[in-house]
DNA sequence: TTTTTAATTGGACAATCGTCCAAATTAAAT
DNA sequence: ATTTAATTTGGACGATTGTCCAATTAAAAA
């Protein structure tokens, strides 16, 4: 029994595993495409495998049925969202001030590579079904929780520097408000994609933050003169 | 030809028309119940008529099929939303200051009779499908437009009284920001119904508005000492 | 090359979907 | 009481749904 496992996750460099993973991904992406284009209600196994150009039975083999595939698709979309977000965040450098981190989060979440018709369609389609399906809700929550932790940490640092009464309460309000704003802007984009103005959206959020932390935020984003 | 029209919308007091309307409404409400409970994807003609306790064919007779029924259900939900909202707004009286109107809009939109699990489920379910169905989107837009007009008028008055640069731009930002906040709070409610705090939600929005119009808004809502 | 095993195919299958209509029911008109 | 017309019923219908599996293909091991 030197080298004879039955777990296909061995041999990960093998041609076999490569093809397997390629098809797996193709089906997930086909699912997301269908959801974005047709909505969840009109997305069927038939439409998915037709777009993927693969065979009906594969969805059972890889995902144990349609529900499993949809769950995998949500996980994929959720991970992609954060991969994109963190990639943009890293442009601010590792030694960024907390207010710069906040600005980066806001500008990233409003940037075309994250806030676009495809992502908005997918996200709202899944949210619409989230209430009934625990598996969907958990990924919706994950996105929310990670973003919240990121902001909470930054605002806590800001509160420590700025003179505010009840710092932990203020940090929570700032986090809650920023998240609500970002969510609301996504909805605004969903309803008025053509008229949406990314700059205006950012400016409005900074207006809120400059009211809370006048030493750390101006109308155009983070202020640098005040140390963390 | 004194009194023999074929339009059933005559005879509106007749027993016939009463029963007809009763069943029509029962089917619409059954549809909304199903959507709230099961989501759109799992809401079928069968589940609807079973809940309504009526017969399969009626949905074709009254609404020309499932799509027509769903459209009527959205219209009904949209109207109910505004009926509730306006009912709450009227409590402020007809001679309210603009900042009081804004406060009333915010508090109403966050009140249990409007922001609750049933309404949130329905609204997000329909929004999730809105992108693909024009008939759905139009009602989503309607709600948005009417709310926007209401706020825009109030903020324009406030801008006239308060000293701000570029009043029309500021009024638009305030309207846009308030709407985004309200939308975001609905999403927050959707994702964290148990932890949601209505008072906190209102306070955060007022914080935003007091930053914009310090003479008209405080952390607890509208200020009265400044005339319209 | 031959054997083994993993991956993929494509259709059969029962269940459910939404549509539609002929028949039954019931209120209103005669 | 009888006729007319509006409303409701409940099932037939073909289309489509998601699941599943026996057969096929192709990579890896022997």
Image (spheres, coloured by chain):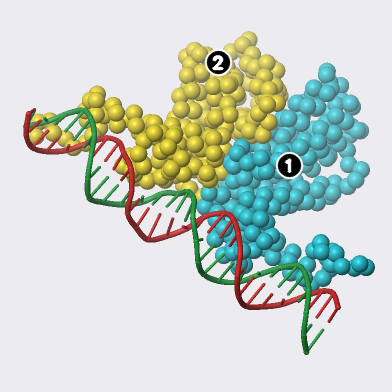
Chain colours: A yellow, B cyan, C red, D green
Q: Nearer the viewer, residue D24 or B45?
A: D24
Q: Residue at x 47, y 34 (%)?
A: A32
Count the marks.
2
* Element assignment for label 1: helix
**Location of residue B51 by image quarter:** bottom right
Badge 1 sits on which subunit?
A: B
Reading the image, the residue beneath label 1 is B143
Quadrant of the rendering where the C terminus of chain B is positioned = top right
Q: Residues within 10 Å of mark 2 (few under 14, many from 20)?
A: many
Left-right relation of B217 to B227: left
Which mark is drawn over residue A97? 2
How far apart marks 2 and 1 lie (CA) works out to 40 Å
In the rendered structure, are the residues bearing label 2 and label 1 in contact, judged by CB atoms less than 8 Å apart?
no
**From the viewer's perspective, is residue A41 above or below residue B216?**
below
Residue A119 in view: yes
Query: x, y percentage for residue A12?
Result: 25, 27
């Amino acid at each position: 029994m030197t080298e004879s496992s039955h777990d296909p996750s061995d041999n990960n460099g093998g041609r076999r595993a490569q093809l397997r993973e390629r098809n797996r991904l193709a089906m997930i992406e086909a699912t997301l495409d269908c959801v974005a284009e047709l909505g969840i209600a009109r997305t069927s196994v038939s439409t998915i495998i037709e777009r993927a150009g693969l065979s009906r039975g594969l969805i059972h083999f890889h995902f144990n049925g349609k529900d499993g595939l949809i769950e995998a698709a949500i996980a994929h979309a959720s991970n992609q969202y954060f991969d994109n977000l963190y990639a943009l965040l890293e442009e601010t450098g590792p030694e960024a001030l907390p207010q710069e981190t906040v600005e980066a989060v806001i500008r990233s979440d409003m940037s075309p590579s994250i806030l676009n018709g495809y992502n908005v369609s997918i996200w709202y389609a899944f949210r619409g079904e989230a209430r009934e399906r625990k598996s969907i809700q958990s990924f919706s929550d994950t996105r929310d929780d990670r973003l919240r932790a990121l902001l909470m940490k930054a605002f806590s640092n800001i509160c420590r520097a700025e003179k505010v009464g009840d710092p932990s309460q203020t940090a929570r309000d700032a986090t809650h408000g920023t998240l609500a704003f970002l969510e609301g802007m996504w909805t605004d984009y969903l309803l008025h994609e053509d008229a949406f103005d990314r700059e205006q959206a950012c400016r409005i959020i900074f207006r809120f933050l400059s009211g809370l932390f006048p030493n750390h935020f101006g109308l155009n984003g983070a202020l640098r003169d005040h140390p963390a």
